[in-house]
Amino acid sequence: MERHHLLYLLAFSLSLNLGALGTLAFLHFGRGQESGGLKAHPVPPSDVWRPLHLSPGQRQAVEGLLGAHRRRMRELQSLIAREREQLLAIIRRGEPAWPEVQARVRSINDRQAELEEAVVVLFLETQKHFTPEQRRAFGKILEARVPAR
């Protein structure tokens, strides 16, 4: 009888150890990896600009660009939200015309592309205010945001 208890205890111990090893492997190898592209959580602008050691004039120029950029991003996000609501309304109608659905999806995709372009324009415009060393450092910051494949 005692033998069975020891076997159960051994099996339980092995499964517990395998679970712990699996958790450690996940935490070590799987943490922070996204499904491609940029990391899921945006970095606050201060975390991007701080390592560049911007002068007060540079900081003021970048903050001006950021203000305009934020307004543009909010505008585009609002347009995308409205487009998605319209798409949902089309789908709820019942059997929608496929060309109408495609047109709405293309419009949403175009707005999302505009979001990406706005970010690239911000990066290009801000670099105009950087020294060559700051440009190199900024490039490394951007590279760190894109995971290696």
Image (tube, rainbow, N blue to C red):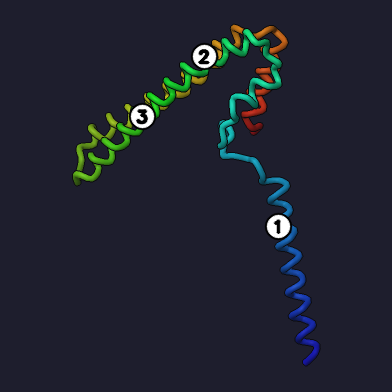
The amino acid on which the numbered mark 1 sits, given as a three-letter code, is Gly
Q: Residues within 10 Å of mark 3 (few under 14, many from 20)?
A: few
Please name whichever residue, 122 or 145, is drawn nearer the observer in this view of the structure: 122
From the viewer's perspective, is residue 28 above or below residue 40? below
Relative image position of residue 40 (x, y in whole percent):
56, 37
Q: Secondary structure at mark 1?
A: helix
* Residue situated furthest bottom in the rendering: 1
Q: What separation in Å lies between label 1 and label 2 (alpha carbons)? A: 46 Å
Relative image position of residue 39 (x, y in whole percent):
59, 34
Q: What separation in Å lies between label 3 and label 1 (alpha carbons)? A: 43 Å
The amino acid on which the numbered mark 2 sits, given as a three-letter code, is Leu
Q: Earlier in the sequence, mark 3 or mark 2?
A: 2
* Residue 63: quadrant of the picture: top right
The amino acid on which the numbered mark 3 sits, given as a three-letter code, is Ser
User: Residue tagged by mark 3?
Assistant: 78
From the viewer's perspective, is residue 131 above or below residue 14? above
